Image (tube, coloured by chain):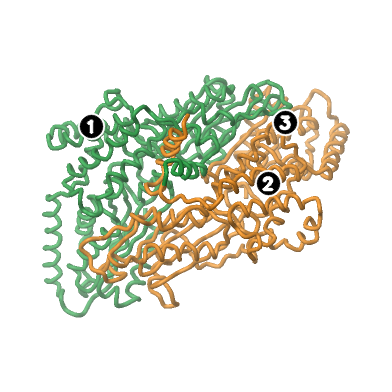
Chain colours: A orange, B green
Amino acid sequence: MGALEEAHLAAAACACEEEEESDYIGLLAGEAAAGDAVEPAVRALLLGLGEDDRREGLLRTPKRVAKAFRDGTRGYRQKVKDIVQGALFPEVGVDKRTGSAGGTGGQVVVRDIELFSYCESCLLPFSIQCHVGYVPSGGRVVGLSKLSRVSDVFAKRLQNPQRLANEICGALHASIQPAGVAVALQCWHIPLPENLECKTLEGWIRTSHSSRSGVFEGESSTFWTDFLALVKLRGIDVEAKDHTVSIPWCPLRSHEVLLSNGLCKKNSTNGMVSAVTSMLLSLGEDPLRKELLGTPQRYVQWLMKFKACNLLDVKLNGFTLSNVSLYERLGGGTTDHGAIRSELHLPFCAQCEHHLLPFYGVVHIGYFDNGSGEGIDRSHFQALVHFYGCKLQVQERMTRQIAEAVYSVSHHGAMVVVEANHICMISRGIEKIRSNTATIAVLGQFLADPSAKACFLQNVLDSVGSAV
Amino acid sequence: MGALEEAHLAAAACACEEEEESDYIGLLAGEAAAGDAVEPAVRALLLGLGEDDRREGLLRTPKRVAKAFRDGTRGYRQKVKDIVQGALFPEVGVDKRTGSAGGTGGQVVVRDIELFSYCESCLLPFSIQCHVGYVPSGGRVVGLSKLSRVSDVFAKRLQNPQRLANEICGALHASIQPAGVAVALQCWHIPLPENLECKTLEGWIRTSHSSRSGVFEGESSTFWTDFLALVKLRGIDVEAKDHTVSIPWCPLRSHEVLLSNGLCKKNSTNGMVSAVTSMLLSLGEDPLRKELLGTPQRYVQWLMKFKACNLLDVKLNGFTLSNVSLYERLGGGTTDHGAIRSELHLPFCAQCEHHLLPFYGVVHIGYFDNGSGEGIDRSHFQALVHFYGCKLQVQERMTRQIAEAVYSVSHHGAMVVVEANHICMISRGIEKIRSNTATIAVLGQFLADPSAKACFLQNVLDSVGSAV
């Protein structure tokens, strides 16, 4: 296929985007070359994690991560002016007075724009609910989708919430030239793995920020009051206090002491830190910019939480052995099985080996006791889930591995249901924010006896209402 | 800029998509030429609506609609095989047995994939909540995002819910070659304008459909039972009866009698029907395919609901005159004003003049009575809202026009808040499903007295909890 034909196909792919889309993509000088820097960086990270980058599941991971990273940072290559150009509509028949129906109509607020960004302190994703208002002037209104598109340009860069709000506000003010712009953001930062919960954004660290220009400025601005009221109509109180927010909001920054005492000094991660630094450089970012100092270290610190760890093996062996002996002591190994027992909503956070992004949620485990009515302690299951969850994984394999481990202890049968949110499904191209994946593995008596399986599933279902 | 450079830029724009994205875009023969057919068709529709296609707001509408239409039907140009290729991962260390943890792990279900499609009966959008499950076989699992991407290929065509479910199921079965595939869809069709409500999907016509292959087939399939249970964990009962569904589900089909007695016979819409037929042809569709018979007529019937109508002018004059006289009879025109009165949650459905897609929601109107404590009857406001809403519009202008009309009757002051969902914001490229736009217009005493404005906004806010 010739280059021109390829160009035609590529153009067709782009046509599915907004009309100005094909116009506003610019490239940083040398971006193609810089993009190539990400793949070797990812390979270095995999090796640093003690992984074999030639194993099947990881073979295309560097390519995949590089593409996702380019996508997630495409805002560096987009220009606001080109997005807004051609989307300013004169509203004929109205005079030029400002901000009331006597002008071009009053305030316009697009509420609940869902965005995703990357934290500049740690390179992990954060989720944004964005509300944008402006007061038209000069007899011109802007196409509503542009408020969302311009916001996305800045979200698709390494950010912190306040600068994001400021940049959206400033860019809209400069490009639309309205009487004023108001931006309010509610942001959720992914927490440390141990604090993740299954429900979308539960356990995430929340913060609210706003930015305003022109007629929205000043304590007594009635436009700002109106903006707050219009956002409140959606049940959102922008000025409400954030009880959950830590300062600094990035959880890896608030654990900086641990960082400096720990991994940072280990020579073993130096190569990984350099690799992440090269990823920052590939964006045209300055790794010495104040906000980015320590970012590679923090991201590596996060990743290293998912290094396959021998220490945990010991812990797991403890589980297996002690419980096997417990089980045998209680009469295990006979053909009779006891009651179905359920250990539900065991939290986990794994790292998707295809995209190097977290997936997290809960594990439900079903097994049979030995007829004594005595089950296995929850802490053992939690250790098991942690062992199989806290590494580079895929959900399907993790489900099977946990089931097999439980089956090796509870010989009559084991059943596992895993429910997980995959960041790779929500922060990347397809952005299916609410999608959630369930996997199931069934062994022994649960496989032979549909009623046993149904009983366990019913236990899970009954627990959903009462679960946190 | 040379063609090759342009190709480079276009390729960069595509790179933000999934890795295989750039591979799987094919073109129907002559698609470029066919795409060009849509713009003149849209121009014909505008003229049929009695609009001046050279007025500012409509100038780029044909181009915009053509691009949105190409985007919304991009599934015709995508190939499933290319999406799935390269995303099948061998799960090493597991044997080939099927559907249990002893095989490649059990069932995998991605729940709550949000999609948008076009109804083949009327070309209006419908919203989809899609749940896809499969049981791996042959020791291979597929990347989770592929389940969403393949579903989207078929959603981005002219569809009906059952065929959509069947096509997703069939395509996944053929490309992944699993032990079986299960697909469950909950679909919401946009209702007739008069039935639209402000809240997302409220008032929309719901239906549920499913499709299954392989091990999911048969009444006694435990895999199907498990699938239903796993979906139920998200609070979704796929097999629950749809109380709201009409048969046929497309509301324009169930009003077919009206259609055949009405517009269909009018020569005046023949040109519009031909225009829509040419849009179908541009997709490579056969307008004589059974399901598409009458589709152009139905779409034109929908559009004609938004034709600027002189009949309504009369009705509105009735409002204005009768109320002005009422107002004057009650002492209007004096400098004293009475109490603030609110007429809230007046529903409307307009057609966005930039995209020829509906935006709909509610209008809140504030005004002053003349001190007598007697307000204007709600039905008059509803007629006013209908007059300004039911045409090609932009929300900003509509808000101002309603405010000015109310002000012309209630001389002390008028205030209008409009809250609307824009289909162009959710079914097109940016897919901000939950975004909602508020506009506000303020005149007279409401402008001079911030406490009057605050009082009205508080009325609106108080009503939100109690509103339907």
As drawn, which residue projects farthest toward the front?
Answer: B2
Q: Amino acid at mark 2?
A: Ala
Q: Position of residue A32 (x, y in %)?
A: 56, 46
**SS under mark 3:** strand
Seen at 66% across and 52% down, the residue is A278
Mark 2 or 3 closer to N-term? 2
Seen at 12% across and 35% down, the residue is B266
Which chain is disc 3 placed on? A
Q: Residues within 10 Å of mark 3 (few under 14, many from 20)?
A: many
Q: Position of residue A209 (x, y in %)?
A: 52, 65
The residue closer to the viewer here, A415 or A139, is A139
Q: Which residue is mark 1?
A: B256
**SS under mark 1:** helix
Q: Residues within 10 Å of mark 2 (few under 14, many from 20)?
A: many
Mark 1 in CB contact with mark 2 (< 8 angstroms):
no
Seen at 32% across and 35% down, the residue is B35
Query: For residue B225, what is the image quadrant?
Result: top right
Q: Is residue B78 left or right of residue B255?
A: right
The residue closer to the viewer here, A126 or B236, is A126
**SS under mark 2:** helix
Q: Residues within 10 Å of mark 1 (few under 14, many from 20)?
A: some
Mark 2 in CB contact with mark 3 (< 8 angstroms):
no
Please say if A59 is above or below A49: above
Q: CA distance from mark 1 to mark 2?
A: 61 Å
Mark sitting on residue A41:
2
The residue closer to the viewer here, B400 or A338, is B400
Mark 1 in CB contact with mark 3 (< 8 angstroms):
no
Q: Which residue is mark 3?
A: A414
Please say if A123 is above or below B216: below
Query: For residue B156, what is the image quadrant?
Result: top left
